[in-house]
Each structure stands twice: as structure tokens, then as C-alpha cells.
Image (cartoon, helix red, strand yellow):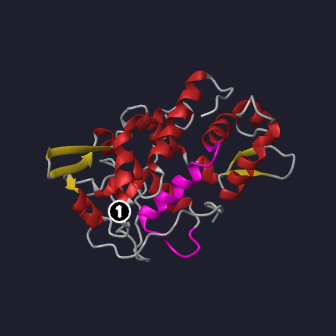
């Protein structure tokens, strides 16, 4: 990631979260990780759970996830190879329902409720827009900021007008608001509501337990502990089975592998969302 004019600790935090998003956002990665959330699987067993993937698509994805340290390949003998979660991937699973909780409240779904897995993928697409993380951090920290001031902070070595394409995208996505040309920018309700998501991703990317997310210096709310809101996923469209609701006040969000893949998926999942964002 290009350097910013933010304090070193903040810049490092944004870089870690950006790297984490780059690891999990590519198409099918979250679905592969969820398929591996039980016991280690042979390649053929994993392919059967991800039957919409064509021949030749799964292997390079598995290789990239192994290289990223999220999946472990175990060769028991020449004919017996299994794939399973690395410890880092197991720690990621509780972050995913936090993303769904945000999507249930803010993600625009004009065709009706989406399965949870699609809500996760669509939300991650918004967060991986170019310079999105840096802009969101600055607006959360400083409130209203002009485009020129944002440019000096987010891309100090670039022409300041280069800030406007990512800003316009974030406005179109519904994460940032402005009153018009020449007016300062600020987080929308949806952008401000990303606190638990970005705080959790920051904790995970730093190798910290997720319960420290509420203490994040930018996205945390140390004095406020709102009651968790349960979420319910819809099965309105054919797709790999959605995640079941599992958020309670006593436990971290979680689900069981048998719930996610309780039936065979026959339809190809939809592509990532276009620009348009969580605007209700």
C-alpha cells in the first residue's frame, strides 16, 4: 500500500487490514474457507462441496490460500492429501458473522434478502475499493474533511485531484456523504456502522483476540457495549447454503460446517456487486 501522512501506528494498522482484505476477498476464497471449516478434506471431497467451480478453478485458489497461510496441505502419503484450516483461518471465522450483521442493516438488496455468504462477499467488495480503508480511517478520526485535505493525508505524494475518483466511488457505495461539490466529506451511517467490522479485521490481522476490537483506537467504542443483534439469512435464491444465525450475548458468532453445507449447491453464485453500495 502507498504510504500516507497518517501516524505510523495508524498507517501500519490500515496496511494490515488492507492486506487481510486482499487475502480473503478474491472470488470463492470465503466459500472455500467455509467449506474447510470442519475436518480436513481430500481434494475430491472439497470439490464436491464446491460443485459450481469448474475444473481447474479450485486448485489455484487452494494454492493461493496455502501461500497466504490460511489453508494447510497435509500429504499423508503419495495418494492421500488433505486440506484443512490453518490456525489463522480458524480465527477468521468469527469475523464473518460480524460482516453479515452490518450487511443486514446497511447493504442495499433491491431484489430481496441475500444469503449470508453473498452478503459477506458484497460487503468485502466495498471495503477493497482503492484507498477505501485509508479514507474511512481518516473520516472516522477527523469527522468532516475536505477533498484537498484528504488527499494530503491519504496520498501525499500524488496529485491531490487523484483523491476524487475513490471518494466518488465511496459516495456511490453509500459509505461516505457530502453536501455537494466543494463541500467536505464525512462518513455516512453505513460507513460509521463499519466499526465492528473494521475493528474485528484489525484485531484478526494483528493476531489479537477479537474481543479487543471494541478497544480499537479509531473504530472501537470502549464505553459503549450495545447488545448484539441476531441476524437471519434468507434462502431466497439458489446458492451455497447461508450461514445460520449464531450471535448471542454469551458467545462469539459461530456456525457449524454441517449447517453451511446442509445441501448440495447447484447454481453458480452471482458475481460481486457493481458500484451502488449499501444505499437503502
Q: Secondary structure at mark 1?
A: loop
Residue bounds of the magenta highlight: 109-132
Residue 55 lies left or right of residue 183; in this view the side is: left
Instruction: Inspect this view and state whether residue 35 appears.
Output: yes
In this view, which residue lies farthest toward the right?
182
Q: Is residue 63 above or below residue 116?
A: above
Residue 151, x across and y down, in percent: 76, 35
Is the N terminus in the top left, top right, bottom left or bottom right quadrant? Answer: top right
Which of these two is toward me, 276 or 160?
A: 160
Q: Position of residue 195 (x, y in %)?
A: 54, 44
Relative vertical location of residue 92 with respect to residue 47 in this rendering, above or below: above
Q: Is 76 left, or right, of 177 in this rendering?
A: left
Residue 18 image offset from top left, x and y in percent: 53, 39
Residue 11 placement, left or right of 200: right
Q: Quadrant of residue 155?
A: top right
What residue does disc 1 label? Answer: 243
Residue at point 82% right, 41% down? 161
Picture quarter containing residue 86? Answer: top left
Amino acid at each position: 500500500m502507498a504510504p500516507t501522512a497518517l501516524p505510523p501506528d495508524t498507517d501500519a494498522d490500515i496496511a494490515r487490514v488492507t492486506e487481510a482484505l486482499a487475502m480473503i476477498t478474491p472470488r470463492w476464497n470465503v466459500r472455500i474457507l467455509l467449506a474447510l471449516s470442519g475436518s480436513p478434506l481430500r481434494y475430491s471431497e472439497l470439490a464436491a462441496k464446491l460443485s459450481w467451480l469448474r475444473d481447474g478453478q479450485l486448485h489455484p485458489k487452494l494454492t493461493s490460500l496455502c501461500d497466504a497461510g490460511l489453508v494447510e496441505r497435509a500429504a499423508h502419503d503419495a495418494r492421500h492429501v488433505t486440506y484443512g484450516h490453518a490456525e489463522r483461518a480458524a480465527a477468521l471465522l468469527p469475523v464473518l458473522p460480524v460482516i453479515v450483521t452490518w450487511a443486514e442493516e446497511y447493504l442495499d438488496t433491491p431484489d430481496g434478502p441475500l444469503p449470508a455468504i453473498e452478503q459477506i462477499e458484497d460487503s468485502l467488495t466495498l471495503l477493497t475499493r482503492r484507498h477505501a480503508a485509508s479514507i474511512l480511517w481518516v473520516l472516522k478520526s477527523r469527522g468532516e474533511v475536505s477533498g484537498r485535505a484528504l488527499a494530503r493525508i491519504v496520498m501525499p505524494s500524488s496529485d491531490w485531484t487523484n483523491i476524487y475518483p475513490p471518494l466518488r466511488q465511496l459516495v456511490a457505495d453509500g459509505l461516505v456523504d457530502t453536501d455537494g461539490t466543494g463541500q467536505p466529506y464525512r462518513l455516512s451511517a453505513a460507513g460509521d456502522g463499519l466499526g465492528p467490522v473494521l475493528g474485528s479485521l484489525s484485531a484478526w490481522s494483528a493476531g489479537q483476540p477479537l474481543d479487543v476490537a471494541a478497544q480499537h483506537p479509531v473504530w472501537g467504542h470502549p464505553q459503549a457495549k450495545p447488545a448484539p443483534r441476531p441476524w437471519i439469512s434468507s434462502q431466497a435464491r439458489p446458492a451455497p447454503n447461508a450461514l445460520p444465525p449464531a450471535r448471542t450475548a454469551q458467545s462469539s458468532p459461530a456456525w457449524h460446517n454441517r449447517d453451511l453445507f446442509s445441501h448440495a449447491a447447484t447454481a453458480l453464485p452471482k458475481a460481486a456487486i457493481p458500484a451502488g453500495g449499501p444505499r437503502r
